[in-house]
Amino acid sequence: MLLIAVALQGHARGQAAPPRPVFDEAACELPNVSPEVRPRLRCGTVSVPRDHARPDMGQFKLAVVVVRSAQQPSLADPVVYISGGPGEPLTIYTDYQARHPYARGRDLILVDQRGTGRSEPNLCPETYGELRDAALAAVADASDETLATRRALYLACRDEALRHGIALTDFGTRVTVEDFEWVRRALGIGHWNVYGESYGTTVAMTLAALHPGAIRSVILDSVYPPDPKPLHSAIVADALDAFFAYCAGEKACSTSFPDLAGTYRETLDRLGRNPLIVAVPPALHRPNGEVRLTASLFEVLVGSLIDYPTAYPGLPRLIKAVHDGDASGVGAVFASERAVYATWNPAAAAAVDCRDRPGFRVPPPAAANVLDRSQLYGVCDGWSDLGPPPLVPIGTSVPTLVLAGQFDPVAGPSLSRRIAELIGKSARAVEFPLVGHNVRHFSPCGTTVVAQFIDKPAQATDTSCIDRTPPIAFAAYKHDAGGRPVGQAVSPRRAISN
């Protein structure tokens, strides 16, 4: 028995101990951090298994920032913010996040998801620029030739990742969830409040389904609906219908723009017959610095603008100007959209969505427009195998608040209410008027409601501020001295936290 014990002890010594979650603190090398915020930061990395089922297969370092509450000592149970995308960085926006707390007195945890921002791995550094340009080009021109070029670059990116020893099966929402659970344990957090925004709601729901015991509350801001989901173009159409109906019922808008819905349809018809030529900034790398404004492309731009309440005042005027043949304001929209995607990593987005979503493995219907054709259809079937699906925490007892914007072109109020119904009695859906995607960023009322909910998630939250939402101050339509229509250079701003 002694010999057997010695042999077993020797065998144990010969095996590597499984890795454990550790937060390795480091200097905060973050951009644009204000002097009042910097002392409150703890920065570092958490090394997570590449494959959580086989922790001996290597690790990736994730960038993690802890923002200490301005009120000290902090309350227990911090907030972890899970950003959208997928493919968007987060920790570079630490200063903004620190100055817009989710709940008073609680620390905030920020994590760059694997493959994004400052977290490993660096997917496709050799082809990243070309791939992003090709992904954006497909939005402007969803022709078969453009989509074929985009597919070839995605597959070249896939091959590059494989050459560098990166397994594309080590991605997807289920993997991301285990990464966050690893971070929680590394920071020694017993329970946290989980705030998911856009794609982050997919992670938050799956986290609540798999690790409910570590979660005090969940906020789902602007749901990224699970498969099967309606075509993106259909949800955008619902959002625009709601916006046009609001204009028709609002005196200033209906006076300046009678029948805005009809004007929009007529604009698409005119652009279908006679596209307009639009001058665009050099950063878009277009031949002769121009883009043909087709009906499909205008649908994309308007569908994007409905995301942003900052664009609502000038949106009717932009539609009317293009209707009357003046596309001078469209170039600024292109520039703003290009800036939105400056930090987006399309490879990281594909690495997650192609594992999560079987819907991207079948061709879109013949009736689908550029809003759907320019997504990942035709890419995922050659990217990686389908992974385990994201989850909805059906029947969970974790208090859950679902925020929905009236004009959200990604999910919309009806899909958000459906998610709350699936979750069950612990969930409540709240619709915020005159908001698109990312409710809390654009709605002061949303900020108030979220703070109250995190403070006391088991109690009914006061949502009366919704009734005090100010109306949209629409810009009037004008003409210059020569009688030509004057358009509106609409400059949307995506929530920089997403």
Image (tube, helix red, strand yellow):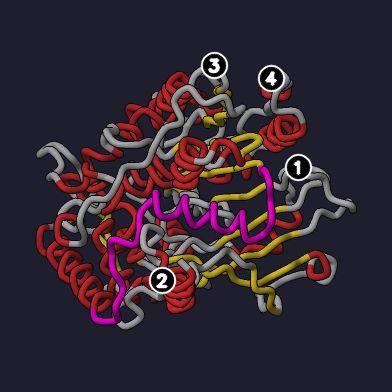
Q: Residue 206 versus residue 350: which sits nearer the camera?
A: 206
Secondary element under disc 3, as helix, strand or loop, is: loop
Q: Are marks 2 and 4 in contact (CB under 8 Å)?
A: no
Q: Which residue is mark 1?
A: 103
In the picture of the structure, the residue carrying the numbered disc 3 is: 425
Point out residue 173 in the picture as x, y percentages from the top left corner: 39, 50
Of 365 and 242, which appears nearest the observer? 365
Q: As displayed, is residue 12 above or below residue 474?
A: below
Query: Front-most of 465 and 40?
Result: 40
Tell me if label 4 and label 3 are in contact, CB under 8 Å.
Answer: no
Badge 2 density bin: few <14, some 14–19, many ≥20, Cα 10 Å: some
Real-space Cα separation, disc 4 to disc 3, in angstroms: 25 Å
Part of the protein shown in magenta: 163-192
Q: Name the residue that disc number 4 marks.
A: 467
Q: Choose between 486 and 316: the one closer to the eye.
A: 316
- Kind of residue at disc 1: Ala
